[in-house]
Image (cartoon, helix red, strand yellow):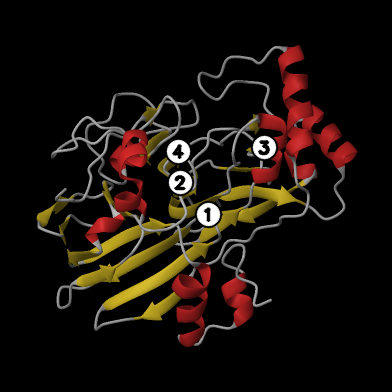
């Protein structure tokens, strides 16, 4: 097959915490009227799978491509299962997101009957002055004290409230209680999963009240899946100088995914070689992308999925793109960052699995 970059359908979620930031601040077109909470840029979640929009694979879902062309799509690496391993989204927290968590891998298998959980990371694209996020709990918070705070809906009594600034990223391991907003626009990368446990008295989809019995059941399940240890921090990422005018910044990394932000001026194009699938999302002005025999435009706030079979992509600047993938942590992350002069502790702080031990 003559592989080319894949344009995909993007499921839209109109939850009550959303607004119009994805359209108005990012310039995304083609969205329905009303609040837009999320656009799922690349998804293989059951019931919300992306479908190829054009070319010889038009109409095929990511699940079909995984079944029929896993090696060409992901590369010659162990196959993680029937689903494409990455889920990426734009999320508009015009209002606060519900306080919630996603199970980690072991808990998802034990309690949810799912093959894995959901670790995620948020890269902040825009944040209002004074914007904050709730990420993890204070030291010393135990199950009983957390339960009392959830019953009172007094989240600040137990959770860490962190300042949020555009350009920063936080890596959120599965099992971490979290929320962000209002006034926060993020790009999110995560494991392919939609399992979650909420602490709220209303449904995030439409704001309708959660009946008491259902709410207490939700809290019990959340407490069973909660991990008290993670206390993630926002950080600006670590840069690796490349060609003249081209910069690579590693925003986060762990065993499940890495996210990078690449920029280039007008003089030197951004050229990136790869052996695993790459998700390329445009965070800047429209650019021209060339990969294999294919050349085409990529508008702002739009995404291309690059199959591993392509091997290389060229983006003509000025460019500002986000690149997500499943990394080899030593080859792709630790070794180049250490060679660029970053210390082991700074590299380890990007996520999980990067400790020099």
- The number of numbered badges drawn on the structure is 4
CA distance separating discs 3 and 4: 16 Å
The residue under label 3 is 109
Q: Earlier in the sequence, mark 4 or mark 1?
A: 4
Q: Earlier in the sequence, mark 2 or mark 1?
A: 2
Q: Is label 1 or label 3 in front?
A: 3
The residue under label 1 is 256
Where does residue 10 sit, x and y in percent of width and height?
31, 34
Q: Is label 3 or label 4 in front?
A: 4
CA distance separating discs 2 and 4: 9 Å
CA distance separating discs 2 and 1: 8 Å
The residue under label 4 is 82
Q: Earlier in the sequence, mark 1 or mark 3?
A: 3
Where does residue 113 sit, x and y in percent of width and height?
65, 30
The residue under label 2 is 85
Task: Judge by depth and name the residue closer to the eye, 182 or 121.
Answer: 121
Q: Is residue 198 visible?
A: no
Tell me whether circle 1 and circle 3 mark residues in contact (CB < 8 Å).
Answer: no
Picture residue at 73% right of the left edge, 20% below the top? 215
Q: Residues within 10 Å of mark 1 (few under 14, many from 20)?
A: many
Q: Is label 4 or label 1 in front?
A: 4
């Amino acid at each position: 097959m003559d592989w080319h970059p894949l344009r995909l359908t993007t499921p839209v979620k109109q939850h009550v915490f959303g607004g119009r930031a994805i359209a108005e601040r990012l310039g995304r077109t083609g969205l329905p009227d009303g609040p837009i909470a999320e656009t799922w840029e690349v998804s293989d979640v059951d019931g919300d799978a992306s479908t190829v929009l054009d070319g010889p694979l038009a109409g095929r879902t990511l699940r079909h491509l995984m079944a029929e062309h896993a090696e060409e799509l992901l590369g010659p690496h162990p196959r993680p299962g029937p689903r494409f391993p990455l889920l990426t989204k734009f999320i508009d927290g015009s209002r606060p997101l519900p306080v919630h968590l996603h199970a980690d891998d072991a808990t998802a298998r034990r309690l949810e009957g799912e093959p894995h959980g959901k670790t995620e990371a948020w890269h902040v694209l825009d944040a209002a002055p004074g914007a904050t996020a709730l990420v993890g709990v204070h030291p010393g918070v135990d199950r009983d004290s957390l339960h009392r705070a959830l019953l009172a809906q007094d989240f600040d009594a137990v959770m860490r409230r962190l300042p949020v600034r555009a350009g920063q990223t936080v890596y959120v391991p599965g099992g971490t209680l979290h929320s962000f907003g209002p006034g926060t626009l993020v790009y999110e990368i995560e494991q392919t999963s939609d399992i979650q446990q909420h602490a709220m008295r209303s449904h995030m989809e439409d704001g309708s009240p959660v009946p008491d019995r259902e709410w207490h059941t939700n809290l019990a399940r959340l407490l069973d899946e909660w991990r008290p240890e993670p206390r993630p921090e926002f950080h600006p990422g670590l840069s690796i100088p490349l060609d003249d005018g081209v910069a690579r910044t590693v925003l986060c990394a762990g065993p499940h995914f890495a996210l990078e932000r690449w920029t280039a001026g007008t003089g030197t194009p951004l050229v990136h070689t790869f052996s695993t699938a790459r998700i390329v999302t445009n965070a800047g002005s429209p650019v021209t992308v060339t990969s294999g025999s294919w050349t085409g435009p990529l508008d702002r706030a739009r995404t291309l999925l690059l199959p591993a079979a392509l091997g290389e992509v060229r983006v003509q600047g000025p460019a500002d793109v986000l690149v997500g993938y499943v990394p080899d942590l030593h080859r792709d992350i630790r070794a180049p960052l250490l060679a660029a002069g970053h210390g082991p502790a700074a590299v380890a702080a990007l996520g999980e699995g990067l400790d020099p031990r």
